[in-house]
Image (cartoon, helix red, strand yellow):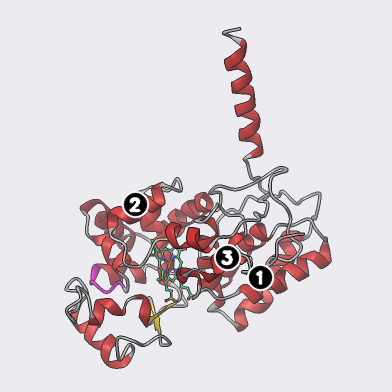
């Protein structure tokens, strides 16, 4: 008996492991053209709207950090439920319509086969590729979750006011290490932010109308003069990597070393010797080093808490749980 118990446990553990795995080309037999349909759609539409690439990348991150990469970020609120979309960090997400249109194209090819979570993961990867960014592998087989809760999104998605230790904890909670934190933050080489995401650093850092001393003074003055003209600006968008916000490069890390990261969470990455050394290394290395590291961390991020096998569902409409 003492032998059988652990053996059964091991076996069940092994099965659990197999079920928990994504695999490359999961749809090869069930919907052989699925990945092609997604790539073609992205290749057709992203060149007309290149800023959507950043939005999709961020959406995939926000999906994975709340209940794993299960498409829960895509679900609409109902009268009975405030979904993740309603949470503050998600109110600035864009590109939901892009995913809906993509889902329709995939459904036309093979109805009810490809999950919204996989569509988002593949679209984010392909869109970044179209704008010249790194390529990473996206094993598939994610299933869609049916729970989407705004308060969970608020607590799981790191805030731009986070310091280094809370960022590390938020990432470690998802199985991501300090290197992943530095590499994935590099996503801020593309895209834009609303003034309100960082205006406390310009106008009210400690509650006395002061400025964050860790932010470069010239840059802060420029932002106040030309972008975020007052503390209540909710509409102006600021390039996170000014001058090359559509180009995936090490510009973001260069800015960090000049104390020009937009968020406290960006600036936090230079507050520790080890993280700063990693950033210096990325800046000094050929671009391929950042690309390769980013790709590895994205593959890891894309597998956070995934539901596979018979768990979850394949949502028919990405914004609505199947009834
Ligand atoms: C480390 C913790 C992180 C924090 C605190 C954070 C916070 C933010 C905030 C506040 C914005 C601007 C939202 C706005 O004002 O419109 C933003 C934008 C963005 N974030 Fe992050 N982020 C983090 C990590 C990541 C990661 C891991 C990724 C992807 C792998 C990512 C991708 C992006 C992208 C691409 C944008 C631009 C979105 C657009 O242009 O629509 N971020 N982030």
Q: CA distance from mark 2 to mark 3?
A: 26 Å
Q: Residue at 55%, 52% (x, y): give it.
A: 68
- Is 168 positioned to the left or the right of 108 in the image? left
Residue at point 51%, 49% (across, down): 300
Disc 1 and disc 3: Cα gap in Å?
Answer: 17 Å
1 or 3: mark nearer the eye = 3
Q: Main secondary structure of the magenta part?
A: loop
**Closer to the N terminus: mark 1 or mark 3?**
3
Name the residue tied to disc 2. 168
Left or right of residue 155: residue 48: right
For label 3, the crowd category at 10 Å Cα-Cα, with few meaning under 14, some 14 to 19 and many 20 or more, is: many
User: Which range is magenta?
Assistant: 257-261
* Depicted 147 relative to depicted 202: above or below: above
- Helix, strand or loop status at disc 2: helix
Tag on residue 83? Answer: 3
Asked if the residue under mark 2 is in contact with the one under mark 1, i.e. CB atoms within 8 Å, the reply is: no
Q: Is residue 160 visible?
A: yes
Quadrant that contains the C terminus: bottom right
Residue hosting label 1 = 99
């Amino acid at each position: 008996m003492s032998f059988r118990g652990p053996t059964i446990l091991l076996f069940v553990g092994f099965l659990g492991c197999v079920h928990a795995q994504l695999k490359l080309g999961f749809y090869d037999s069930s919907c052989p053209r699925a990945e092609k349909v997604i790539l073609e759609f992205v290749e057709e539409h992203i060149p007309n709207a290149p800023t959507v690439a950043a939005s999709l990348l961020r959406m995939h991150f926000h999906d994975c950090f709340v209940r794993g990469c299960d498409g829960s970020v895509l679900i609409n609120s109902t009268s009975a439920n405030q979904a993740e979309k309603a949470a503050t960090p998600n109110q600035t997400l864009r590109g939901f319509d892009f995913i809906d249109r993509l889902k329709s194209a995939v459904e036309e090819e093979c109805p009810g086969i490809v999950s919204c979570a996989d569509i988002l993961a593949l679209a984010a990867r392909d869109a970044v590729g179209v704008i010249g960014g790194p390529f990473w592998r996206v094993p598939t087989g994610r299933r869609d979750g049916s729970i989407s809760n705004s308060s969970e999104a608020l607590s799981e998605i790191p805030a731009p006011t986070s310091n280094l230790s809370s960022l590390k904890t938020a990432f470690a909670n998802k199985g991501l290490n300090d290197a992943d934190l530095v590499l994935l933050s590099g996503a801020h080489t593309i895209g834009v932010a609303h003034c309100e995401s960082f205006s406390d650093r310009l106008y009210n850092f400690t509650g006395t109308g002061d400025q964050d001393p860790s932010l470069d003074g010239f840059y802060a003055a420029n932002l106040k003069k030309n972008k975020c003209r007052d503390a209540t600006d909710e509409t102006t968008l600021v390039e996170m990597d000014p001058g090359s916000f559509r180009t995936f490069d090490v510009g973001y890390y260069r800015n960090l070393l000049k104390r020009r990261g937009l968020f406290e969470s960006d600036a936090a990455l230079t507050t520790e010797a080890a993280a700063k050394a990693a950033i210096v290394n990325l800046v000094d290395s050929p671009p391929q080093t950042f690309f390769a590291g980013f790709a590895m961390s994205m593959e890891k991020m894309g597998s956070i808490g995934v539901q596979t096998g018979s768990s979850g569902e394949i949502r028919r409409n990405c914004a609505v749980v199947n009834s």
